[in-house]
Structure formats: C-alpha cells, structure tokens
Image: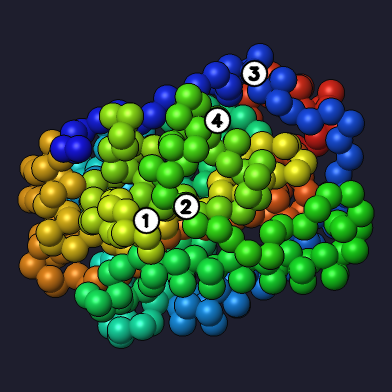
Amino acid sequence: MQPTHGRDDLAGPGIGTYEEVEKILPTGYRSLLDRKETQKAVFEAKGYIEKHLSRELNLMMVTVPLIVDAQSGINDMLDRDGSRTPVQFHISNDYNKHPIDAQVVQAATKWKRFALKELGIEMGEGICTDMRAVRKDYFLDHDHSAYVDQWDWERVISADQRNLPYLEQTVEKIWKVLKGAETHVHEVFPKLKEKYPEMADKIEFIHAEEVLEMFPKLHRKERETALLREHPAVFIVGIGWVLKNGHPHEMRAADYDDWVTETRTKDGRVFHGLNGDILVWNPVTKRRHELSSMGIRVDAASLRKQLEMSGQLDSLKFDYHKGIMSGELPLSIGGGIGQSRTLMLMLKKAHLGEVSVTVWPKVLKDMCAKRNIHVLE
C-alpha cells in the first residue's frame, strides 16, 4: 500500500465529555495510601526509577529547559496535524530592543538530541531528564493533564542498532526498571499489595497492523483496550505509519520517532516503524493506561521521507533538521516515561491528581469527590 498523510484513527466512543468521564471513574474506590504516605511513596518510586533507569541504559541525569525560543523549531509538536500548539509568550527584554518569543515546552524530544552533541555524550551513553511541560490542548480527565512530567531520556546509538531487535531490547530494560520500582515501593508500603494485581512480569510486543487485524471492527483505543484485557503489558510497534485501513494507529510528529522504516517480523511479514508505546491494563480504572512513547529516532533518509509524507519539507530550514540531514546530530533512541502516569499505576490511584498538583475544572473535582477520589490542590 502506498502511504498517504492519513489522519489519526478515530478513538471511537468514549472520553471527550465529562458525562463520559463520570461513567468511567471507578465506584467503591478507596486509596490504599493517605496523602502523606502517597507523597513519601511518590519519591520512593521516583528515586528508584531515576537510579535504575540510568544504570540500565547508561544514562546521566541532566538539566532540561522549561521554555525555548519559538524560532528555534526545537519544541515538540506532538503530532503532525498541527492541532496541539504550545503555550507561547513574548519577552520584551530591554524595552523590546532584544525581544524573545518563547514557548513552554510540550516535551524535550528534539532538545535532547542537541544536548547529546553539546554534552559530548559518547556511543552507548545517554541522558535522562526530570522534564516538566505544559500541553494546553488536552481534554482533562482521569489520566490527561495540562501539566506533564516525564523522564525524558535519549541515548546515542550506531547505524547498525537502528533495528527492531535493539528497540525491543531497550523496551525490556525499561520494563525491568518499572517492574523493579513497583516491587520496591510495595515492599516499603505493603498496603499497596492488598487489593489489586501487580504489573505483568514481562512485556509483549505487537505491531499496530497486527492489532488492527485482531480487532478490525474496533476503533484505535477500543482495540488497545481489547488487547490489554488479554495481554496486560504490551509495546505496540509502528505508531504513525498508515495502516491497511487507511489511517495511522495514532498520529506521530514527522521529525523525531522513525515510523517509516521497513521492518520484518520473524515470520517474514513486512511492517513499518521503529517506535511505539508502552501500554498496560490499569486494574483500578479498568482501562488502558499509557506509560511511555519512545523509539529509534529519524536519520536523514527517514526524516526527509516523513516530512515529505506529512507535507512539512519546509521544516528542513530549522537547525535541528539541518543537523540530522548533515549528520551533525548523533543517531539516537529515546522516549518519555510519564511520571504521574507511572506513579498513578504503581500506587493504585484512580486519578492523576492524586499524585501530582495541577489545575482541574470544578466539574471534574466535584465528580472525583463524590467517588472518594481526592485530587491534590
């Protein structure tokens, strides 16, 4: 099939209004930890993950920007249809003689690749950040917030590591860290083992095309939910490439993850994409739960092809894109692991607002209060 720009596969019926949110918030919920215990557990898990993720992937913790120059082209646009725009503001600076138009980062995806070069990170080494961002275009529900916190990481790789087995090996190392963090936190806070099952011991791999084949009549999020009921921890490969139904599983920006490169399965089937998402079944909300989006990053060939498919070849004027095309920026693999999403899962919470402080509409806070879900103020 000849790829086209495509649009995101429809999510289907579900969250999009607070009437729908009210239907999916769990009933009979009781937090296993009080607020004070929760804060202690948050930092117990956070410390474990940062230490062991750095050890498994050979990363070093580095500082990360909250704002970037709007003209740099370095902000993460999240998708390729332009629907999620960053918060932008003007810094007059010296009575507007030397102004800056700044943007709040939506993720540090592109910045990290510059940082690899600037910090002199060697082959097989990488960086990890305690990233904070704002994504103003999200619908705020139980697991989507305008405030985003991630372990945003990036690692230098060689050309011969740009393949599916290397991607899967990296995912397995990340899963080992997350599973270890859950075990550690549950040992410190035994109450967390009282009611709900633990995370799966192993993560399974499946291509987005195979998920579509398994559930051809379901929309994207419905497919993920059906899959997770049978396989509680999965990495869905190839997100961004247009599938046989004419749509990508989900939109991906054209200039960081490589979703166009051809791959082959062990049985010889031809698919596309060197990226994907870690998804799990959440036993508290009884819903799909995304923990991470990651992948092998574009090289010069895949960047040009993805920009062409997305109608964005004019982006080649930016320094970031020039650096990839010229080979000045290193080849890399990277991703973002949602901190609040991960902590929500490990601490058996029903809402992101129980582990992070941000803004929520009154209608949602009132709904949560009626369900014994107490969001932080």
Residue 323 location (% of width, % of height): 14, 65
Q: Amino acid at mark 2?
A: Ile
Residue displayed at 54% across by 38% down: 224
**Label 1 crowd (10 A; few <14 / some 14-19 / many >=20):** many
User: Distance between the Cα atoms at labels 3 and 4?
Assistant: 15 Å
| Marks 1 and 2 in Cβ contact (< 8 Å) | no
Decide: marks 1, 4 in contact (CB < 8 A)? no
Q: Quadrant of the N terminus?
A: top left
Look at label 4 and name its amino acid.
Answer: Glu
Which residue is under mark 3?
Answer: 20
How many residues crowd mark 4 within 10 Å: few (<14), some (14–19), many (20+)? some
Of marks 1 and 4, which one's residue comes earlier in the chain? 4
CA distance separating discs 4 and 2: 16 Å
Return the x and y of residue 332 as percentages of the image width and height. Answer: 30, 69
Q: Nearer the viewer, mark 1 or mark 2?
A: 2
Identify residue for label 2. Answer: 206
Residue 111 in view of the camera: no
On the image, the x and y values in percent for residue 315 come to 13, 46
Reading the image, the residue beneath label 1 is 275
C-alpha span from label 2 to label 3? 29 Å
Of mark 4 and mark 2, the one earlier in the sequence is 2
- As helix, strand or loop, the secondary structure at mark 2 comes to strand
**Could you say whether the residue bearing mark 4 is in a helix, strand or loop?**
helix
